[in-house]
Image (tube, grey):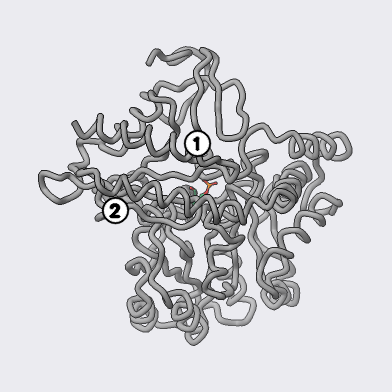
Amino acid sequence: MTPTKYPDGNVFFRKLTWEYPRVTHGKGCWLYDDTGRSYLDAVGGAFVSNVGHGVPEIADAMAAQAKKLAYVSGMTMSHDAVEDFSRELASRCAPGLDKVYPLSSGSDAVEAALKLARQYWAELGKQGKTRIVALSPAYHGNTLLALSASAREHYRAAFGNWLVDVIRVPAYDSAALEAAIVEAGPETIAAFIAEPVGGSSTGALVPPEGYWRRARDVCASYEVLLVADEILVGSGRTGTWSALEPDAVVPDIQIFGKGIAAGYAPLAAIVAPSRITNALAAGSGGLNHAQTFSHHAVSCAAGTATMQYLAEHGLVERCARMGHALHERLAALSKLPSVNAVRGRGLLAGVDFVNPATGKPYDRTARFAESVTRAALDAGLVVWPNVGHADGTNGDLVMLAPPFVVSEDELDQIVDRLSAAIAKVAS
Ligand code: PLP
């Protein structure tokens, strides 16, 4: 494939050796570039475009808000956009989770949620409760506290002594969680943060039956706040609004991002119960996490319009239905020699690779996941690579998370194109 503009221009791209197609527009599950090529977006960019591209209702709601009021500081004033967004989001959360703090990225929201947990205990006079427990593998973002909570070695390596010490427990093992809390001393621990279903770091690992009820009990009995990072798996992605709904488990703090405004605006949010915000109100008077673009009017309007669009078109239910159709089709991929397993729930799937010659993950130098992603892109399919789930460094995955509007025909195309890309790279 010929690079369109690279390396010309002034953009400091995230990957400086990647050939970036220049996308001009999108509609539904499809993206189009300036050379006339089309791409089937099988991962909503980065698990974001849940309602598909080019939805005029959401664009119109944002434009209307920008014309009326684009911005006031969230420190000093309120407006309809943030009141409406907070009401819409709280109405979709479990009873009690009723206070919404909008922010502008997932990492930012993870930082705020963890600070909220620590501040909550300090307000109650338990200043010793400061440590965080997190899973391995896990990913919670790229700012330094969120990265500290993430078990992603290739992102962490360069920043060693800037990161804080986080207690790591193996993903979805409730006995290990309890043992780690007891060993560290519950009086030292503020929060346990985890994704309800593993996102990209585990290749859509679905926890064993009963894990979340047990983890909920463990957190409650040791006075540890349960922080559910639903940035990737929430907002309907796994077929229910919250990925904890099937387990009937209510976290202490819930975090949304990515699909909450489906890419129409950079938006994330933490949701907490009044018992937590009341402790802050009675103590220091507010959350110690001020950001210029929190409670942003246009972003909130995008979030409200996205949630309303999902509801009006029954898209979360559709995600559950089409999720079954996707996983039925993906069963065929499991038969490829270089595929170890296919996992997931709803319209979220992880394809985990294995080197058939060794029965182990490919050597990292083979860059298998990246090569499959490039081969898929060259064949007009957008997927997401992830590496390191096996031991922090090794392990190759490709993730799928198509928009909820995906059709059965598009699912067929996704699976056909992906299987051709895997076969090409494996050979
Ligand atoms: N948490 C999870 C589970 C994520 O998947 C991500 C991003 O991929 C983040 C947090 C960080 O979100 P952002 O990239 O918007 O900062």
Q: Is mark 2 within 8 Å of ligand 1?
A: no
Q: Residue 18: give x, y in percent of width and height.
A: 38, 24
Residue 352 in the image: above or below residue 207: above
Residue displayed at 80% across by 34% down = 63
> Of callouts 1 and 2, which one flags the residue occurring earlier in the amino acid sequence?
2
Quadrant into which the C terminus falls: top left
Q: Is residue 262 left or right of residue 131?
A: right
Residue 130 placement (x, y as % from top left) = 49, 72
Q: Residue 261 at what x, y percent from top left?
A: 66, 46
Under mark 1, the amino acid is Glu
Label 2: few (<14), some or many (≥20) within 10 Å?
Answer: some
Determine the residue positioned at 55% across, 22% down: 32
Front: mark 1 or 2: 1
- 353 lies above or below 164: above
Residue 163: % across, % down: 40, 55
Which of 427 and 102 lies nearest the eye of the viewer?
427
Left or right of 73 in this view: 321: left
Q: Which mark is drawn over residue 86?
A: none
Q: Nearer the viewer, residue 125 or 147?
A: 147
Crowd class of label 1 (few under 14; some 14 to 19; many from 20; radius 10 Å): some
Asked if one can make out residue 91 in the rendered structure from this viewpoint, the answer is: yes
Question: Considering depth in this image, is 239 or 272 the residue closer to the camera?
Answer: 239
Quarter of the image for residue 2 reads: top left
Mark 1 residue element? helix
Q: CA distance from mark 1 to mark 2?
A: 22 Å
Residue 160 visible in the displayed image: no
Q: Which residue is mark 1?
A: 410
Please, what is the three-letter code of the amino acid marked with disc 2? Ala
Give the left or right position of residue 175, taking residue 248 as reference.
left
